[in-house]
Amino acid sequence: MLLLLAVLLGWDMTWWLATLGIGGFLGGFATLVMRMRTDDEDDEDPGRGAVV
C-alpha cells in the first residue's frame, strides 16, 4: 500500500520509503507462510466448511 500510495501521489522514491515498502511486503509474506497449517487436509471435520 505504501509503495502504491507513493506512486499515485508522485512522492520521491527515497531509500527509506523503498526500504519500508519492501520490508513490509516481505514481513507480511513471512507472516503468511509461518501461519500456514501443516496438518493433512484429509481430516473428517464437518465444521470446516463445504465439501465439494
Image (cartoon, grey):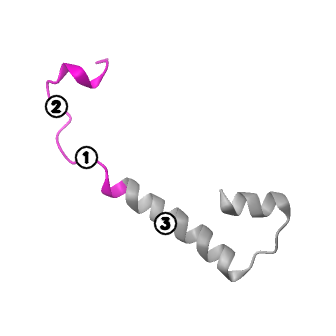
Q: Which residue is mark 2?
A: 42
Q: Which residues are magenta?
A: 33-52
In the image, residue 46 lies in the stretch drawn in magenta? yes
- Looking at the picture, does residue 45 appear above or below residue 1? above
Image quadrant of residue 40? top left
Q: Position of residue 12 (x, y in %)?
A: 81, 74
Q: Position of residue 31 (x, y in %)?
A: 39, 58
Going by the numbered disc 3, the residue's amino acid type is Leu
Cα gap from disc 1 to disc 3, whole angstroms: 19 Å
Going by the numbered disc 1, the residue's amino acid type is Arg
Quadrant assignment for the C terminus: top left
- Main secondary structure type of the part rendered in magenta: loop
Going by the numbered disc 2, the residue's amino acid type is Asp
Q: Which residue is mark 1?
A: 37
Q: Secondary structure at mark 3?
A: helix
Q: Residue at x 69, y 63 (%)?
A: 3
Residue furthest out toward the right: 10
Q: Indicate which disc residue 26 carries.
A: 3
Cα gap from disc 2 to disc 1, whole angstroms: 13 Å
